[in-house]
Image (cartoon, grey):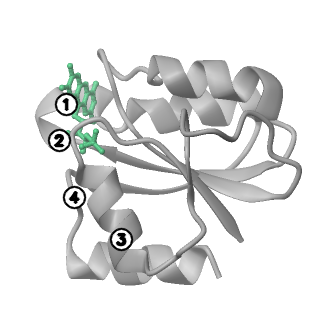
Amino acid sequence: MKIVYTSRTGNVQSVIEKLGVADAIKIGEGVDKISEDYILLTYTDGYGEVPMEVEEFLKNNSEHMKGVIVSGNTGYGEAYCGAGNVINEQYNVPFLYKFEEGGTDEDVEKIKELIK
Ligand SMILES: Cc1cc2nc3c(=O)[nH]c(=O)nc-3n(C[C@H](O)[C@H](O)[C@H](O)COP(=O)(O)O)c2cc1C
């Protein structure tokens, strides 16, 4: 499965590197339109919000999104990984997994299974 992701401070980026997927697409780096099925990995912004670059990307690219995996920080309480709830409701795709910051080795293994 194709991976599309975004990362502002490097946490999601580090997970992508540990997954060992060479062809992951970073939002904002040249691919405006994706025509194959993919899973989105994103962080959470604001208070439980979807990052702006993801909102923009999904305006044209939600059709092939098959699920979302989200990074956040439990310090945000109820808004922990809230971007996943928003995307799940707005686009009716499964919220597959959440993890804190750059994730643990266990998180990486679980994500590997999910994206197979
Ligand atoms: C301004 C700001 C707002 C954030 N808001 C939330 C939030 O509402 N919920 C949450 O779970 N994490 C929140 N976070 C934490 C990030 O989602 C988390 O650190 C994530 O791992 C960042 O991923 P990145 O390093 O790939 O950009 C916020 C972080 C920042 C800097």
Q: What's the CA distance linking mark 4 and mark 3?
A: 11 Å
**Residue with the mark numbered 1:** 77
Quarter holding residue 57: top right
In the picture shown, does residue 93 fall above or below 67?
Answer: above
Q: What's the CA distance linking mark 1 and mark 2?
A: 6 Å
Q: Closer to the N terminus: mark 2 or mark 3?
A: 3
Residue extending furthest toward the front: 30
Q: What's the CA distance linking mark 2 and mark 3?
A: 23 Å
Pair 4/1: label in front: 4
User: Residue 74 shows which numbered tag?
Assistant: 2
Please state the horizontal and vertical placement of residue 35, each as a whole percent of the image.
88, 49
Q: Closer to the N terminus: mark 1 or mark 3?
A: 3
Mark 2 lies within 8 Å of ligand 1 (Cβ measured): yes
Q: What's the CA distance linking mark 2 and mark 4?
A: 13 Å
Q: Closer to the N terminus: mark 4 or mark 3?
A: 3
**Residue with the mark numbered 3:** 17
User: Residue 102 shows which numbered tag?
Assistant: 4
Per the image, label 2 sits on a secondary structure element best described as helix
Q: Are discs 1 and 2 less than 8 Å apart at CB?
A: yes
Q: Closer to the N terminus: mark 2 or mark 4?
A: 2
User: Residue 64 shows which numbered tag?
Assistant: none
Quarter holding residue 39: bottom right
Q: What's the CA distance linking mark 1 and mark 3?
A: 28 Å
In the picture shown, does residue 34 fall above or below 24?
Answer: above
* Residue drawn at the location 33% of the way across and 53% of the way down: 12
